[in-house]
């Protein structure tokens, strides 16, 4: 190895599925592209099970995720991380923000929050917490909210381009720990990306609006920010996002129907602008063809013809 190569930063990506349902073709696309993104530059890839939602997370979904990834041929490095096993670390991060005075306790009742949510906001579609508890000075009870500084946050997304988000105007002080001590997604993702040494976050466009919140938490915790890559989502023929409920298009159902995993990678690659790829594409072929400049910004529509083509290539 050349001396200058050993000095180059090794990029570390991650797959972070939530085991709260079956994975579908939308997940397959995001994960296959995230995997190719890392592997095409000899980067590493970590796996994290985002299983903090105790009611929805199920061990059988975790097992399905392993089977789905293995079937598609998407591998990862090191041991998977389970967020549910890191409650102490995540709670300590929240406690540190509280000690530092950048998080405060909120005892707003559901009714109060609902009233605030109904108040019309100036051109703001997402609900904004009005900061009711900011000065209440509550100790030791209630949820913890992060005290959002005023003004826009700017960052450059590797796929979506320059972004500017005013978290204080759009979302307000957001919850980082629920009143019963469950760390919120925004906090957990930041602490665990740092724990896993993640330098590049490749994920779906639905999380682009969360990125500024995560940047604020990274700054407050003194963590370095990864580079961000938000890929367009998959829509069904009626223009709706594929949902976990779309069980008939789950990877498990397709596998059980005898679909060839290479047909899924072929669809993923071609839908990502890699038009030279064959209908049956191996993981290695996806990696060598991968080029994020072809990805585009428009969501991908999964048509009945796409599904029929996958089913036509059944192995049994
Ligand atoms: N667990 C999240 C999901 O399945 C992804 C979180 C992330 O990539 O930051 O939607």
Image: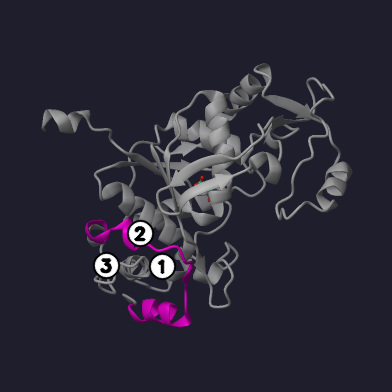
Give the image location of residue 61, x and y in percent: 53, 52
Dot 3 falls on a residue whose secondary structure is loop
Q: Which residue is mark 2?
A: 71
Q: Which residue is mark 3?
A: 281
* Foreground of the two, 274 or 296: 296
Image height of 113 relative to 135, above or below: below
* Foreground of the two, 21 or 8: 8
What residue span does the magenta drawing correspond to? 286-313
Give the image location of residue 243, x and y in percent: 58, 64
Dot 1 falls on a residue whose secondary structure is helix
The answer to which of marks 3 and 1 sits earlier in the sequence is 1
Q: Residue at x 36, y 82 (%)?
A: 312
| Residues at discs 1 and 2 in contact (Cβ within 8 Å) | yes
Q: Which residue is mark 1?
A: 255
Spatial CA distance of label 1 from label 2 is: 8 Å
Give the image location of residue 93, x and y in percent: 59, 24
Quadrant in the rendering for residue 132: top right
């Amino acid at each position: 190895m050349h001396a200058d190569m050993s000095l180059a930063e090794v990029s570390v990506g991650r797959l972070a599925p939530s085991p709260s349902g079956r994975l579908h073709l939308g997940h397959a696309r995001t994960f296959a592209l995230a995997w190719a993104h890392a592997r095409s530059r000899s980067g590493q890839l970590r796996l994290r099970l985002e299983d903090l939602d105790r009611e929805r997370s199920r061990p059988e979904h975790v097992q399905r995720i392993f089977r789905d990834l293995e079937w598609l041929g998407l591998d990862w490095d090191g041991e998977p991380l389970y967020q549910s096993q890191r409650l102490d670390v995540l709670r300590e991060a929240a406690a540190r923000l509280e000690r530092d005075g950048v998080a405060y306790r909120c005892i707003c009742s559901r009714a109060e929050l609902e009233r605030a949510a109904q108040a019309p906001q100036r051109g703001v579609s997402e609900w904004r917490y009005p900061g009711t508890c900011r000065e209440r000075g509550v100790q030791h009870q209630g949820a913890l909210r992060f005290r959002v500084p005023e003004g826009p946050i700017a960052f450059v997304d590797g796929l979506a381009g320059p972004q500017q988000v005013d978290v204080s105007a759009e979302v307000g002080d957001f919850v980082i720990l629920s009143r019963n001590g469950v760390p919120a997604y925004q906090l957990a993702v930041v602490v665990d990306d740092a724990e896993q040494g993640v330098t590049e976050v490749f994920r779906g466009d639905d999380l682009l609006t969360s990125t500024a919140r995560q940047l604020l938490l990274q700054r407050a915790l003194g963590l370095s920010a990864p580079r961000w890559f938000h890929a367009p989502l998959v829509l069904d023929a009626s223009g709706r996002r594929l949902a976990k409920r779309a069980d008939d298009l789950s990877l498990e159902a397709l596998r059980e129907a005898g679909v060839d995993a290479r047909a899924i990678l072929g669809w993923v690659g071609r839908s990502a602008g890699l038009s030279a790829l064959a209908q049956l594409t191996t993981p290695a072929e996806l990696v060598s063809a991968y080029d994020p400049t072809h990805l585009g910004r428009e969501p991908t529509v999964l048509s009945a013809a796409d599904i029929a083509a996958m089913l036509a290539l059944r192995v049994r």
